[in-house]
Image (cartoon, rainbow, N blue to C red):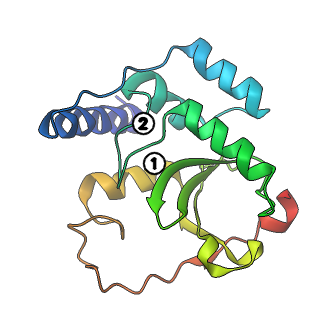
Amino acid sequence: MNETEQLLEQVAARAHASGQGHGKSLPAPLGPEEVARAEGILGFALPPLLAALYTRVGDGGFGPECGLLPLRDAVRAYGAGRSSAWRWPEGVLPIADFGCAMSVCVDCRSETAQVLLFDPGLGEPELAWSIDTPGLAAWLRGWLDGTAWYCDESPAGEEYDLELTPWDGFRSRI
């Protein structure tokens, strides 16, 4: 079993366990045709790991904070962002809502599916984007092992002063 397969199994196990613990069932996985339809609307392919989360684990509802968005909601949020005054970057798909208008996004054009944080509270569109994690796999591992800044069990704690690296790809994608 390769690392990606192992990661998908770990995510699925945690997703199913958390859903049962909260008395709700995990949304069913999507079929490949539903992912293909979303990709057609978006105009770009989802990174393989992100597509596998939707087709093998479930259509959102699992993961950090409020969980991954259902794919239809992510596509809708991307379209709304692209037509907003925030000049949403091409190929950057919102995948989770972290509250206070912050969104976790995946750069679908990067080889590692880089995870970005969008925080409009910083005022200007070019300042609102920062790198959360170099890749989606690392972001998921941080959630699974509790070491990511957004995890309650993180050693950083609530008083952690998060200093993220600004994302320099913004200007080339608007």
Image coordinates for residue 76, horizontal then vertical, percent:
65, 38
Determine if residue 108 is in view.
no
Relative height, residue 105 to residue 163 (above, below): above
How packed mark 1 is, by other alpha carbons closer than 10 Å (few <14, some 14-19, many 20 or more), is some
Q: Tell me whether circle 1 and circle 2 mark residues in contact (CB < 8 Å).
A: yes
Q: Locate residue 118: give its quadrant.
A: bottom right
Image coordinates for residue 31, horizontal then vertical, percent:
51, 14
Three-letter amino acid code at the position of disc 2: Thr
Task: Label 2, secondary structure: give it.
Answer: helix
* Residue 24, numbered label: none
Towards the viewer: 24 or 10: 24
Question: Which residue carries the number 1 mark?
Answer: 137
Relative height, residue 173 to residue 12 (above, below): below
Towards the viewer: 59 or 130: 59
Relative height, residue 46 to residue 110 (above, below): above
Q: Quadrant of the N terminus?
A: top left
Task: Label 1, secondary structure: give it.
Answer: helix
How packed mark 2 is, by other alpha carbons closer than 10 Å (few <14, some 14-19, many 20 or more), is few
CA distance separating discs 1 and 2: 8 Å
Relative height, residue 131 to residue 23 (above, below): below
Three-letter amino acid code at the position of disc 1: Ala
Left or right side of 17 for 62: right
Image coordinates for residue 82, horizontal then vertical, percent:
78, 50
Question: Which residue carries the number 2 mark?
Answer: 4
Q: Locate residue 4: give its quadrant.
A: top left
